[in-house]
């Protein structure tokens, strides 16, 4: 909880400005402020100009008489929030970041333009690691609709480049759906299929009816990435306890699945594509 002094420091008020804004809890003119706060009238006028420019005080006119009054503390908080909102909009960022300790952090990424770089960044910090993923083809299909072929190829190349071993769980019908989509538009999917080959992978399948959502999960060494491609929102969790818990859940799901040779399956699809 911020104190009023921390709030004033946050918006960059000098000690003199803080003294004047406190005096203006009730309307006062320059002479009254100068007398009450023992500040020269020149100094008061200088600070009042600065506070007016930042919308922290208001002018009250009564005929020729002019007094000043400060905005409320709640209005100051709203002003800060409005400034932050405008800053985020101007930088096309809608997400949020919460750091709970030196090691632990929770980040919300919004939009494919944030999610793909976030994944690539995590991958670059987990070279030669085994990462775990649960992805229904429904989620992958949303991914195909949300990102360009170039982005998706870069996404897959980052996995290969950093020598990540994918311990993945897919739905049984995933390769069937890959095949149908590629046959419907070979040119569109050619680069994507090529980028999916050559990954070090250990794949397992689960029945189509399970995990049939637009979301997927990626588990790195100490970081979890939950992605919903339909809404283009991802939650990045850097927390050892949560990630360990989710890895245990992953192993429980994997133990009841069916093993798949991912690279062989993708080679067969590529060969079929070339004959279409």
Image (cartoon, rainbow, N blue to C red):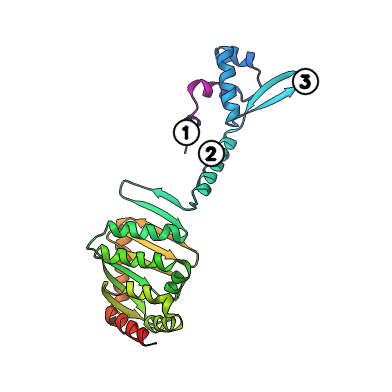
Check the image and report above or below for 202 versus 98: below
Q: Nearer the viewer, residue 128 or 169?
A: 128
**For the residue carrying disc 3, how many other residues have a C-alpha within 10 Å: few (<14), some (14-19), or many (20+)?**
few
Q: Nearer the viewer, residue 177 or 172?
A: 177
Circle 2 SS class: helix
Q: Nearer the viewer, residue 114 or 13?
A: 114
- x and y percentages locating residue 213 in the rendered image: 46, 73
Which residue range is magenta in the image? 11-20
- x and y percentages locating residue 95 in the rendered image: 47, 53
Circle 1 SS class: helix
Residue on which disc 1 sits: 10
**What's the distance in space between the residues labelled 3 and 1, CA to CA?**
36 Å
**For the residue carrying disc 2, how many other residues have a C-alpha within 10 Å: few (<14), some (14-19), or many (20+)?**
some
Residue on which disc 2 sits: 80
Of the 4 image quadrants, the one containing the C terminus is bottom left
> Are discs 1 and 2 less than 8 Å apart at CB?
yes
Find out whether residue 13 is within the magenta segment: yes
> Are discs 2 and 3 less than 8 Å apart at CB?
no
**Quadrant in the rendering for residue 167:** bottom left
Badge 1 or badge 2: first in the primary sequence: 1
Residue 67 shown left or right of residue 6 in the figure: right
Residue on which disc 3 sits: 63
**Quadrant in the rendering for residue 41:** top right
- x and y percentages locating residue 257 in the rendered image: 31, 80
Badge 3 or badge 1: first in the primary sequence: 1
């Amino acid at each position: 909880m911020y104190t009023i002094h921390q709030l004033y420091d946050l918006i960059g008020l000098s000690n003199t400005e803080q003294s004047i804004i406190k005096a203006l809890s009730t309307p006062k003119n320059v002479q009254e402020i100068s007398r009450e706060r023992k500040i020269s009238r020149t100094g008061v006028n200088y600070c009042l100009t600065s506070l007016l420019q930042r919308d922290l005080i208001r002018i009250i006119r009564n005929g020729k008489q002019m007094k000043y009054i400060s905005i409320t503390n709640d209005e100051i908080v709203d002003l800060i929030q409005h400034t932050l909102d405008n800053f985020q909009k101007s930088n096309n960022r809608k997400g949020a970041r919460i750091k709970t300790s030196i090691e632990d952090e929770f980040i919300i990424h919004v939009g494919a333009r944030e999610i793909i770089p976030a994944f690539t960044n995590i991958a670059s910090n987990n070279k030669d690691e085994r990462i775990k993923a649960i992805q229904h083809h429904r989620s992958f299909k949303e991914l195909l609709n949300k990102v360009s072929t170039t982005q998706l190829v870069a996404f897959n190349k980052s996995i290969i480049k950093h020598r990540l071993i994918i311990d993945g769980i897919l739905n049984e019908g995933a390769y069937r759906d890959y095949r149908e989509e590629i046959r419907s538009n070979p040119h569109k999917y050619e680069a994507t299929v090529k980028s999916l080959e050559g990954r070090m992978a250990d794949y397992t399948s689960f029945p189509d009816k399970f995990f049939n959502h637009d979301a997927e999960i990626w588990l790195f060494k100490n970081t979890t990435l939950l992605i919903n491609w339909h809404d283009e929102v991802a939650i990045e969790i850097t927390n050892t306890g949560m990630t360990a818990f989710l890895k245990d859940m992953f192993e429980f799901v994997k133990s009841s699945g069916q093993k798949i040779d991912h690279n062989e399956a993708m080679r067969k699809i590529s060969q079929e594509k070339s004959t279409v």
